[in-house]
Image: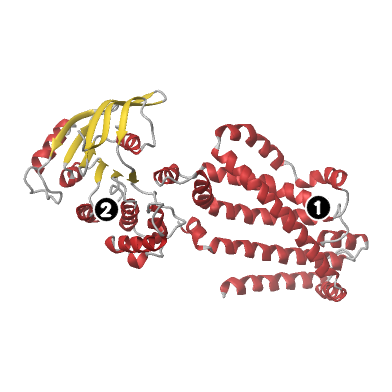
């Protein structure tokens, strides 16, 4: 299919002596927000590294039709750069000097970080740091955004707010997103599709299509059912 | 205010103890001078211009030896820190040479470079080089992988990764290492000047001892201590640089 932007075919990945991923197939279409859930240590981050091109598969193929940026759980910002400089570093290399400043200002506004433009990451709260990560990744204007448990280190309230901000920002500036999390609730709230991964060596156990709309609440149609189905698939109920 | 007042008060107490002990005849004659004798020696050395010349001579050697040592050690440390094979091959030898007192190199320094500034600068180079190479390689080895993954995402060139990521990431540890190294260099220059040259604060002390001028010896020691504090203060200012400060605030 022409609109497939990421495709993993029969992918396997081994660390020395450890089979992490085996016979994994996944297709992500342009503009989709696919959430991957799975038990802790099953290889979710390895999967994301394969998608990002940071790792090469031991078996199978990974096709990526576009550039990507990754947002990490924590620590992906350069601590020696200010918020402004971190975001600016994310901009495409070819962006002209004037437009760079404007774009950085835009992202500072969008992520409500304008008054912290001159601050360093260690001077910010966890939520604010993740907003900078988000701004830096989105500022890159890549087609694909990969998120590696980006909100898991945040408290519940901040996590919920960040999820909404992500969804709102993506509505304004659409991207293809692969979002890895161990939080089932998070998965069913924002995903267009949820990919359930099994224990190591991981492969896709099930794919659930969710009803349209990414700003769901626990009461939204289909949410409880999807959550239940994922729990069953992971052997949690 | 406390930062200045407290050490000044401690210094005054130490001065009072020294003065009282001297007045009470606690030291055998000719072994420890009194504070006024030391003050007179200071006055004499300053008026003759010799103290300033010796200070400049010592600082000149430290500046060259330290700068050369750092400039040679940092690139080597970067390579060792990034390459497992180079680390395996060179790290034990760097540790070997780091364990040798720089003073042990004095015979070679004199044979290779003669007398004057070059042997002293060489000894300072040795004192700084192995320390900084080791500290740099250790710092590079601990740079979080995630920084390199982000750099890969951003498609940074190898030069950009080196200058905009690795060097920046190790800067707090490097600044700490530089601060330690300048202190060591200052200690070593005094020792080197006692043997290899005929100027500098080390030479002032050894020359004063030969003339049994213990007042001059103490004046030289106080000058060395004060300049040591000054050098540390200058290098501690590096930790205030905004792009380095993060390493000291987390």
Query: Chain under label 1?
Result: B
Is residue B214 in view? Answer: yes
Label 2: state its secondary structure: loop
**Quadrant in which the N terminus of chain B appears:** bottom right
Label 1: state its secondary structure: helix
Q: CA distance from mark 1 to mark 2?
A: 59 Å
Q: Which image quadrant is residue B238 in?
A: bottom right
Looking at this view, is B55 or A148 the one in front?
Answer: A148
x%, y% of residue B143? Answer: 49, 45
Looking at this view, is B62 or A157 the one in front?
Answer: B62
> Mark 1 vs mark 2: same chain?
no
Is residue A148 in view? Answer: no
x%, y% of residue A156? Answer: 23, 52
Please name the residue that numbered disc 1 is placed on.
B120
A195 horizontally vs A88: left or right: left
Looking at this view, is A69 or A142 the one in front?
Answer: A142
Furthest-left residue in this view? A221
Please name the residue that numbered disc 2 is placed on.
A155
């Amino acid at each position: 299919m022409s609109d497939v932007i990421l495709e993993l075919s029969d992918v396997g990945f081994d660390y020395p002596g450890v089979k992490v991923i085996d016979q994994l197939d996944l297709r992500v279409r342009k503009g989709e927000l696919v959430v991957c859930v799975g038990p802790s240590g099953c290889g979710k981050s390895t999967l994301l590294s394969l998608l990002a091109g940071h790792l090469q598969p031991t078996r199978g193929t990974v096709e990526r039709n576009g550039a990507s940026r990754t947002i990490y759980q924590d620590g992906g910002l350069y601590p020696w750069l200010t918020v402004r400089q971190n975001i600016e570093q994310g901009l495409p290399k070819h962006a002209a000097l004037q437009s760079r400043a404007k774009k950085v200002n835009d992202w500072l506004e969008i992520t409500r970080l304008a008054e912290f433009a001159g601050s360093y990451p260690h001077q910010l709260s966890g939520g604010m740091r993740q907003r900078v990560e988000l701004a830096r990744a989105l500022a890159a204007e890549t087609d694909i955004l990969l998120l590696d448990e980006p909100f898991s280190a945040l408290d519940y309230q901040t996590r919920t707010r960040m999820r909404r901000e992500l969804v709102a920002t993506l509505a304004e500036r659409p991207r293809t997103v692969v979002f890895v999390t161990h939080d089932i609730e998070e998965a069913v709230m924002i995903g267009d599709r949820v990919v359930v991964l099994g224990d190591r060596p991981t492969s896709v156990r099930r794919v659930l299509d969710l009803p349209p709309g990414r700003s769901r609440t626990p009461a939204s149609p289909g949410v409880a059912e999807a959550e239940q189905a994922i729990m069953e698939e992971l052997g949690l109920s | 205010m406390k930062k200045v007042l407290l050490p000044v008060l401690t210094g005054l107490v130490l001065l009072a103890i020294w003065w009282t002990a001297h007045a009470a005849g606690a030291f055998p004659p000719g072994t420890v001078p009194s504070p006024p004798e030391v003050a007179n020696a200071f006055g004499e050395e300053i008026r003759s211009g010799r103290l300033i010349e010796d200070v400049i001579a010592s600082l000149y050697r430290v500046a060259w030896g330290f700068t050369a040592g750092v400039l040679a050690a940092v690139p080597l440390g970067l390579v060792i820190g990034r390459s497992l094979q180079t680390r395996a091959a060179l790290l034990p030898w760097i540790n070997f040479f780091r364990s040798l007192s720089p003073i042990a190199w004095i015979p070679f320094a004199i044979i290779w470079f003669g007398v004057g500034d070059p042997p002293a600068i060489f000894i300072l180079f040795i004192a700084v080089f192995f320390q900084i190479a080791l500290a740099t390689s250790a710092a590079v080895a601990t740079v979080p992988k995630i920084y390199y993954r982000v750099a890969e995402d951003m498609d940074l060139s190898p030069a950009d990764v080196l200058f905009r990521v690795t060097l920046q990431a190790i800067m707090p540890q490097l600044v700490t290492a530089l601060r330690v190294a300048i202190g060591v260099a200052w200690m070593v220059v005094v020792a080197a000047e006692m043997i290899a040259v005929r100027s500098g604060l080390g030479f002032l002390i050894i020359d004063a001892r030969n003339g049994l001028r213990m007042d001059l010896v103490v004046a030289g020691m106080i000058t060395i201590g004060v300049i040591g504090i000054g050098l540390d203060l200058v290098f501690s200012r590096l930790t205030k640089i905004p792009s380095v400060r993060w390493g000291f605030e987390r």
